Amino acid sequence: MPGKKRKHVRVHREDAPDLAETDLHAVASAGGAVRLSFDGAQLTIDQLDAATTRIINATGSMRSQHLKSCAHRFKEGTGAYKRASKLVKEKRGDTMPAPTMEALHGYEQALREELRRLSTMQRGQTQGRMIEGLNEKAIRMRKLLDAKKKLQSSNKKKGTGKKGGVKKREVAKEKLSTKSKKVDEKIKNLMED
């Protein structure tokens, strides 16, 4: 049993009316700023914030506080964000049109490229710091080992041959042993780092 066919009712639409001459004059005297029914500036700020958060999460930059702050500074440096925040402060946000999808995609692409550039630069700096740290650690370790050898060799020296040389030797040995313990402790700490 076939169902009834719906009748398509055509609604007669009128074309949008043109602006009256007084309205055109009002727009021209306002400097071309047309008041819209929505706050385009706040919408722009919200869209850029959302796009920035999306890209930060998509690229994994949320793990690095440096990259997150760079992404937010990049957002705040864009012309659209500056204009929108200025208009919001002046309470004239309804004079700015909403951002286009093409503009948002362009912003996202530029932000991705900037984060990629910063992350490779940061990775190279981190590796350089690690190598520098290892070199410094090796130099400190070499100095401490040399100091320990020097202490051990001076510990084996014989007395002066004068009276009281045995006592002086014992005092010197005691001082050297405390110095040697300090050097051993520094070497142990350096090895743990």
Image (cartoon, grey):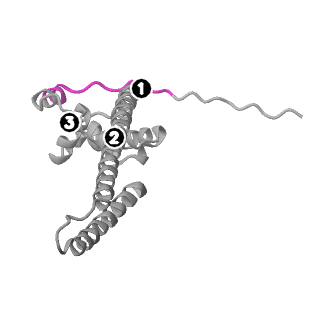
Q: Which of marks 3 and 2 is in front?
A: 2
> Is the residue 52 above or below the residue 170 in the image?
above
182 or 189: nearer the viewer: 182
Q: Which of marks 1 and 2 is in front?
A: 2
> Is the residue 33 above or below the residue 161 in the image?
above
Q: Which mark is residue 14?
A: 1
Relative placement, left or right, of 28 versus 38 is left
State the residue position of label 3: 83
Assess whether residue 13 is covered by the magenta stretch: yes
Q: Position of residue 27 (x, y in %)?
A: 16, 30
User: Decide: marks 3, 2 in contact (CB < 8 A)?
Assistant: no
User: Decide: marks 3, 1 in contact (CB < 8 A)?
Assistant: no
Whichever of callouts 3 and 2 sits on the residue coming sooner in the sequence is 3
Whichever of callouts 1 and 2 sits on the residue coming sooner in the sequence is 1
Magenta part of the protein: which range? 12-25
Give how far apart the Cα atoms at labels 3 and 2 are: 49 Å
Q: Furthest-right residue in view?
A: 1
Point 42% across, 58% down: residue: 192
Point 82% across, 35% down: residue: 3
Q: Which mark is residue 135?
A: 2
Q: Which of marks 3 and 1 is in front?
A: 3
Counting the numbered discs, the total is 3
Whichever of callouts 3 and 1 sits on the residue coming sooner in the sequence is 1
> Is the residue 55 above or below the residue 162 in the image?
above
Q: Residues within 10 Å of mark 1 (few under 14, many from 20)?
A: few
Residue type marked 2: Asn
Which quadrant, please, contains the N terminus?
A: top right
Point 64% across, 29% down: residue: 8
